[in-house]
Image (spheres, coloured by chain):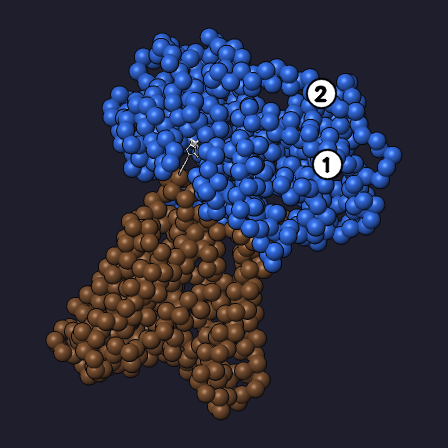
Chain colours: A blue, B brown
């Protein structure tokens, strides 16, 4: 363990605003945190890093009164505190955005931002003031949306931003953000960082969880690293390089480091033979209000990346190919034959799999076990009259837990108790095991640590090499470029270009296409 | 488990999202108009405002009980104890007034207090021990009914002059129409409930709780307090409903209001409130109660059908409405 770092912060404050000492938290079967310390000073941005399941979210939940710790102390402004409820932490000036979007889908955006502290007049909610204030907060983040609509009308990314707006509005001394950037695009990340810097300059202490190494160097002053529930150490960011930081996170497993170095060379394979009939071919496929007519061919063994800003219609375009939404114009051919996908079931019957970006709402059944979640799609594909035997299920679960390195490697653990990144892996396993001919991956690496991300990227490459068609949606352009043979660029719900991924294609060129709507 | 696939089909269109919430309400309103028109065409003397007002007079107590139930269902809970609570209130009032000579001014607040207290207690148990509301309120249902029999196994009729005078009071409206004071009380409760649900912090928290309870907790909303309060409101409403029933029946009896919890739930559901919580309107509940009352009226006008047909029709309607809920945005995955 490293020696405690010298507390030097931008504001030179010498007393931490939030301090945790010797935190220990066990769940049945897992020791999630074991003697973890953390100190946050006013006016610093502090990164909390670690692999999936390292205990980051658990630490945050213990700090904010969601889980009681088994041992250890938390102090605010030097005095010991004990929060029994998240509400109490809020009253003490600690404002938190938890990892999964935790808002109420049935309430309006404005209410989600302000509920619990609505402006009131004569004891009644002052609706016009509420909407006005919500609108002001939203525009501060340069967002443009109707605050009166229910939250459920908005995409996951917007929901995440709304959660951030909510947390920022509280007059907070400490702002905790658990993977706030996971479903955001570049632009939103830039906005968010600007906001975080403004808050930091105002003297707010910010705890920031991310799996993006660059963001740490971009934004943070200090970093605390957890590994397997233990404190690995706390460092000043300027003392570290990205290699040493990753090394601290993954420990001595240099294997991952090697892969990291090598990943930029995996490069693009040769485009598969495009002469044969594509596996899937869309002509003028459209859905009003969601996507303009678009043409797209996906061949077996080909990876098509979809790039575009948040809300540009990436997900919507993909949902049409899975029958999750109905196209109201255009034609779809699968293996050259006309197909009408009335429902996801129909798509599954054509061996198309869709791994949704919204794992909480649309993907996983939290009360079920890891095993049950993994076999769910396969079972659905077989039909309920031909149940999988328990031994088969066990085999399958064990195999995918190993392939994707799901931790803890416990097939009978409830999925909702898994860390965010490990839930994502379970969802992926479910679809991979149906042995699809075409795989649609919507933000599959979101919230996944750097080691697992490399694994998933390798898996995509391997699946394509084995002849699977892949549609890969990601906000990370580097990742799209690394994996895809061709890149479709969306802008304002329109597929503006499909670019072959040759060496001239760079993130900047894609961004240019997004900005101008024309191929440059 | 089906939510996995079926929720993928959930359309994300803005328009539908905005209007989906109101849709069930419109369906109920349309149904009401249709029922009234059919009744008027079929039966002599049906087409009059007094027929509608009589529906309210005969169901004012049910409306009050169903309003309390709406609060509970909006949080995603259920309260099965309301029917027994109503019976207990009639029993308690009759016993206090008739057999102990207590003045109404004392009996009424006492009964209301018992109702609210009993509800709060159930809410507290539900929250603290994280037990299904279904089970806790089922226990409450048996308990309250049992307490009735402890007071008396016989019906106690009310002969107290003040009580009977109030019971016979009619509030006259222009055009020779009239209603009972119970209707006025029920409508005041309705207005209050509307304001509370839509314009107070407590009301909004009720909706938040129904939307997603664990989120509400992480958002720092007072989840525990709100849950206790919601069951207290339901208890209070059933006590008040019991008082209204006492005046309506002029008696207290352990077998009053048997199965009323189911009528109340039916009214709430037909009024467009989702049983999963988070979506619905208390005004819809008023429409739901009117629909139920109108079914009875039509059947009594019809004359030859046995009153059990009311049950059958309500059952059929409930079925249809629950199917409708499923089709129109009711397919949110449960959390
Ligand atoms: N409620 C719970 N019940 C049981 N185990 C839990 C619970 N919450 C978390 N765990 C376990 O505790 C460990 C730490 O999880 P945590 O969510 O803190 O990880 P994390 O560092 O946030 O990971 P990620 O980067 O994937 O979000 C994991 O092994 C997880 O399975
Ligand atoms: Mg986490």
* Name of the residue lying farthest toward the bottom: B304
What's the chain of the residue with tag 1? A
Tell me where residue A518 appears, x and y as whole percent: 78, 28
Q: Is mark 2 within 8 Å of ligand 1?
A: no
B89 with respect to A281 (left or right):
left
Q: In this view of the protein, can residue B132 be seen by the observer?
A: yes
* Name of the residue lying farthest toward the left: B100
Of B160 and A160, nearer the camera is: A160
- CA–CA distance in space, label 1 to label 2: 18 Å
**Residue that numbered label 1 is attached to:** A468
Of A306 and A110, nearer the camera is: A306
Tell me where residue B182 appears, x and y as whole percent: 33, 73
Residue at 22 percent of width and 63 percent of height? B114
Tell me where residue B32 appears, x and y as whole percent: 53, 73
Residue B315 against residue A264 in the figure, above or below: below
**Residue that numbered label 2 is attached to:** A267
A116 with respect to A181 (left or right):
left
Kind of element beneath mark 1: loop
Kind of element beneath mark 2: loop
């Amino acid at each position: 363990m490293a020696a405690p770092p010298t507390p030097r912060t931008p504001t030179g404050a010498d007393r931490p605003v939030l301090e945790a000492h010797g935190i220990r938290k066990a769940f049945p079967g897992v020791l999630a945190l074991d003697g973890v310390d953390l100190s946050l000073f006013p006016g610093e941005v502090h990164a909390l890093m670690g692999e999936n399941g390292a205990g980051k979210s658990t630490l945050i939940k213990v700090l904010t009164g969601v889980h009681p710790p088994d041992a250890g102390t938390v102090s605010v402004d030097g005095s010991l505190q004990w929060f029994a409820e998240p509400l109490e932490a809020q009253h003490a000036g600690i404002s938190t955005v938890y990892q999964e979007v935790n808002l109420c889908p049935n309430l309006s955006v404005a209410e989600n931002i302000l509920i619990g502290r609505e402006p009131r007049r004569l004891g009644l909610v002052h609706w016009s003031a509420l909407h006005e204030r919500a609108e002001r907060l939203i525009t501060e983040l340069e967002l443009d949306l109707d605050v009166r609509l229910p939250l459920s009308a908005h995409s996951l990314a917007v929901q995440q931003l709304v959660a951030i707006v909510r947390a920022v509005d509280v007059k907070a001394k400490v702002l905790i953000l658990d993977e706030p950037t996971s479903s955001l695009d570049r632009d939103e990340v830039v906005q968010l960082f600007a906001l975080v810097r403004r808050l930091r300059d105002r003297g707010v202490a910010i705890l920031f969880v991310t799996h993006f190494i660059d963001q740490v160097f971009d934004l943070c002053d200090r970093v605390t690293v957890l590994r397997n529930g233990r404190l690995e150490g706390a460092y000043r960011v300027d003392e570290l390089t990205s290699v040493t930081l990753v090394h601290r996170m993954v420990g001595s497993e240099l294997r991952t480091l090697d892969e990291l170095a090598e990943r930029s060379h995996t490069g693009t394979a040769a485009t598969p033979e495009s002469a044969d009939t594509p596996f899937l071919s869309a002509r003028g496929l459209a859905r009003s209000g969601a996507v303009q007519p678009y043409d797209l061919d996906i061949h077996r063994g080909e990876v098509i990346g979809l790039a575009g800003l948040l809300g540009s219609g990436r997900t919507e375009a993909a949902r049409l190919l899975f029958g999750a939404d109905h196209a109201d114009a255009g034609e779809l051919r699968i293996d050259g034959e006309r197909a009408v996908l009335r429902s996801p079931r129909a798509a599954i019957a054509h061996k198309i799999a869709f791994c949704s970006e919204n794992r909480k709402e649309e993907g996983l059944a939290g009360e079920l076990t890891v095993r049950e979640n993994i076999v769910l799609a396969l079972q659905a594909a077989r039909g309920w009259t031909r149940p999988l035997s328990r031994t088969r299920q066990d085999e399958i679960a064990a195999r995918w837990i190993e392939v994707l390195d799901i931790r803890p490697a416990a097939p009978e653990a409830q999925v909702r108790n898994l860390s965010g990144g490990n839930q994502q892996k379970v969802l992926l396993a479910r679809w991979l095991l149906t042995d699809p001919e075409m795989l649609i991956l919507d933000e599959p690496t979101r919230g996944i640590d750097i080691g697992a991300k490399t694994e998933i990227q390798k898996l995509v490459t391997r699946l394509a090499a084995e002849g699977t068609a892949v549609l890969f949606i990601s906000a990370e352009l580097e990742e799209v470029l690394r994996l895809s043979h061709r890149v479709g660029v969306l802008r304002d719900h329109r597929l503006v270009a499909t670019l072959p991924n040759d060496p001239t294609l760079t993130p900047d060129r894609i961004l240019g296409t997004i900005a101008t709507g024309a191929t440059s | 488990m089906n939510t996995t696939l079926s929720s993928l089909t959930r359309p994300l269109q803005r328009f539908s999202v905005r209007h989906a919430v109101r849709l069930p309400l419109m369906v109920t309103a349309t149904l009401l108009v249709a029922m009234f028109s059919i009744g008027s065409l079929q039966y002599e003397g049906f087409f009059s405002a007094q027929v509608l007002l009589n529906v309210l007079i005969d169901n004012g107590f049910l409306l009050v009980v169903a309003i309390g139930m709406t609060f509970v269902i909006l949080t995603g809970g259920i309260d099965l104890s309301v029917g027994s609570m109503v019976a207990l209130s009639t029993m308690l009032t009759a016993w206090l007034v008739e057999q102990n000579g207590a003045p109404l001014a004392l009996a009424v607040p006492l009964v209301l207090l018992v109702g609210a207290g009993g509800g709060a207690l159930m809410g507290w148990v539900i929250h603290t021990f994280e037990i299904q509301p279904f089970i806790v309120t089922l226990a409450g249902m048996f308990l309250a009914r049992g307490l009735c029999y402890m007071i008396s196994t016989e019906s106690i009729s009310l002969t107290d002059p003040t009580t009977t005078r109030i019971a016979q009071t009619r509030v006259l409206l222009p055009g020779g129409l009239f209603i009972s004071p119970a209707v006025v009380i029920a409508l005041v409760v309705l207005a209050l409930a509307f304001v509370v649900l839509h314009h107070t912090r407590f009301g909004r928290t009720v909706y938040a709780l129904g939307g997603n309870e664990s989120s509400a907790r992480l958002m720092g909303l007072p989840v525990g307090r709100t849950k206790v309060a919601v069951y207290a409101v339901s208890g209070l409403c059933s006590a008040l409903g019991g008082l209204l029933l006492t005046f309506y029946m002029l008696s207290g009896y352990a077998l009053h209001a048997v199965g009323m919890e189911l009528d109340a739930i039916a009214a709430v559901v037909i009024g467009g409130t989702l049983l999963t919580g988070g979506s619905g309107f208390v005004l819809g509940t008023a429409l739901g109660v009117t629909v139920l009352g109108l079914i009875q009226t039509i059947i009594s006008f019809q004359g030859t059908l046995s009153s059990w047909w009311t049950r059958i029709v309500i059952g059929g309607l409930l079925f249809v409405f629950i199917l409708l809920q499923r089709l129109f945005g009711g397919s949110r995955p449960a959390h």
